[in-house]
Amino acid sequence: MTTDDIKGVRLLVTGATGFIGSRLALHAHRLGMDVVATGRAETDVEIDRLKELRAASVPVEIGVLQDVDFARRITDERTIVIHLAAAQHESEMPEAYFRSVNVDGVRVLLEACQRASVHRFVYGSTIGVYGDAHAAVLDETSQPCPDNIYTRTKLEAEALVHSYANTFESCVIRIPETYGPGDQRLLKLFRAIDRGRFVMIGRGENLRQCLHVSDLVRGLVLAARHPAAPGEIFVLAGREAMTTNEMVRDIAAALDRRPPRVHAPLWPFVLAARVLETVLPSLHVKPPLHSRRLDFFRKSFVFSTAKAQTLLGFQPEIDFLTGAAETARWYRLRGY
């Protein structure tokens, strides 16, 4: 991307107090783009990321995208929007909450973008729309099969984005399991392995293709600027497919620890998750164990990224062992 390209960009990043959104907003700011970020500041992690963004002089607006006036205000004079905000891990919330954030919020934002004459809209979707592919290799032509309220609403939002194709340029990025400095989701895994307390649930032979966050944000910026991106869906994924056993082994190596060897059967955890998911949400209590958390141990995803390579020139640069070591250093520097 040339200096002239950067000077012409007025970027809005939603979900900027999330892991990926915060890394994207900081990356775009370092490139010299005019960036406005928006997100929530309700948890300690979100508040910390908000402070980090503001310390880097990234303007951040706090609000909800279902608010029409707020959506119109943050899209005003923006040329590109990368939408990453979503309801995802709030397992104690009813389905109506996911629909409000992941579908209704996208609709309001798209209408605001139309009003503001936004040039391009990049929608951050999820590989979860494929359900569970087992050992099959997935690409953009593979049939979606969402199997929970989060992935169903994300797929619905993809259709909403496509419906605005005659209004402004848009594309969809199906985001894989992402890790790296700034991530809090895998912190428990790193900590358990570091302390010798990790137990593999199931055989650990399910496949995954993790993407380092630095590679992902490069891909998002490419999608925001590349002339071949409009109207397309892209799957981004990491350099190598690996089993969960191999992932854990590499994290142990990055931490200079012995690989965990203890395995537990999967079925008791599946049964417990079903019971907790049935009973606790009605009491407005977040289940300590739920089916989507167990997906880490049982779902397989392997991808062809040929389309992103051919059309966008996207190539992931960071292998998992290198990225895990970088992530471990980030955790340790912060006392995690």
Image (cartoon, rainbow, N blue to C red):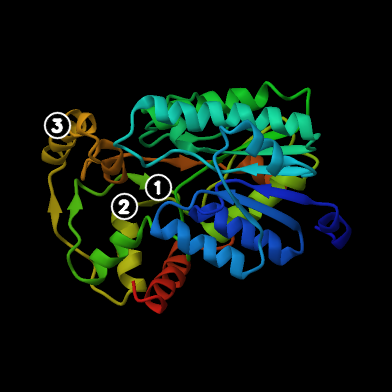
Nearest the eye: 211 or 9: 9
Q: Residue at x 37, y 26 (%)?
A: 95
Q: Contact, CB < 8 Å: mark 1 with mark 3?
A: no
Going 66% across and 58% down the picture, which residue do you hit? 59
Q: Which residue is mark 3?
A: 275
Q: Which residue is mark 1?
A: 208
Sooner in the amino-acid sequence: mark 1 or mark 3 = 1
Left or right? Give the position of 326 relative to 94: right
What residue is at 40 percent from the left and 24 percent from the top?
Answer: 96
The kind of secondary structure element at disc 1 is: strand
Residue 244 numbered tag = 2
Helix, strand or loop under label 2: helix
| Residue type, numbered disc 1 | Arg
Instruction: Measure the alpha-carbon separation of dots 1 and 2.
Output: 7 Å
Quadrant in the rendering for residue 78? top right
Looking at the image, residue 18 sits to the left or right of residue 89; the answer is right
Which quadrant of the figure contains the C terminus?
Answer: bottom left
Q: Earlier in the sequence, mark 3 or mark 2?
A: 2
Residue 278 location, x and y as percent?
19, 28
Residue type at tag 3: Val
Q: Quadrant of the N terminus?
A: bottom right
Q: Is residue 314 visible?
A: no
Disc 3 on helix, strand or loop? helix
Is residue 145 placed above or below 324 in the rendered structure? above
- CB within 8 Å, label 1 to label 2: yes
Q: Callout 2 environment at 10 Å: few (<14), some (14 to 19), or many (20+)?
A: many
Foreground mark, 1 or 3? 3
Marks 1/3: CA–CA distance: 27 Å
Asked where in the image residue 152 lies, by quadrant, the reply is top left
Q: How far from the left and from the top, in percent, is residue 150?
A: 41, 32
